[in-house]
Image (tube, helix red, strand yellow):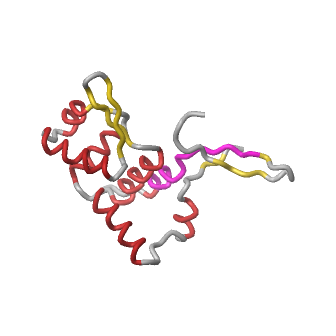
Amino acid sequence: MVRWRLELSKGVRGMNNLPRTREIAENLVQRLRLLAQPQRLMVLACLLEGEKSVGQIEAETGIGQPTLSQQLAELRRAEIVITRKEARQVIYSIKDSMEEMRIRLICAACGPEFDAEQLSGVLRRKKTSPVMTRDGAAACFARIGGDV
């Protein structure tokens, strides 16, 4: 049987990942502030569709070049997006599937048209495969990023 699981599901269901120290709370707040900037959120939403050049991001979001460059630099510093060179163009993409999931989760949970069904769909997006152990018990593992 195929099972679906989000890597954060234990924390979401059991709320075991709540910030219990000042340091953890401050790190969480800093992360949320980074995503709370409208233009950065627009850029990330654009990149959820796949990797894009600066020109493509500018055309799709309507954010002008100087501002767009500043926002992309912030996202690079935070290690949310990565870049690669293709000839003379810089191509941007979201770092990995976990970052994509975080962005989708925030948008689904905090969006103007909050839909619990959409949110649960985000939480089930990772597909896992059962693996049999020596004693016959099944364990599920999810592949995170990269090709196998």
Which residue is painted at 31% across and 44% down in the image?
A: 45
Choose top left, top right, bottom left or bottom right for residue 84: top left
The mark tally for this picture is: 0
Q: Residue furthest top?
A: 87
Choose top left, top right, bottom left or bottom right for residue 119: bottom left
Judged left or right of residue 60, residue 1 is right
- Residue 19 placed where, x, y %? 45, 73
Q: Residue furthest bottom?
A: 21
Depth check, front residue: 87 or 127: 87
Depth check, front residue: 91 or 37: 91
- Residue 92 placed where, x, y %? 32, 36
Asked if the stretch drawn in magenta spans residue 30, the answer is no
Which residue is painted at 25% across and 44% down in the image?
A: 72
Which quadrant is home to the C terminus?
A: top right
Judged left or right of residue 13, residue 32 is left
Which quadrant is home to the N terminus?
A: top right
- Residue 99 placed where, x, y %? 42, 49
Rendered position, 60 above or below 70: above
Judged left or right of residue 78, residue 15 is right
- Residue 53 placed where, x, y %? 27, 31
Rendered position, 64 above or below 116: above
Which residue is painted at 23% across and 56% down in the image?
A: 37
* Residue span colored magenta: 117-131
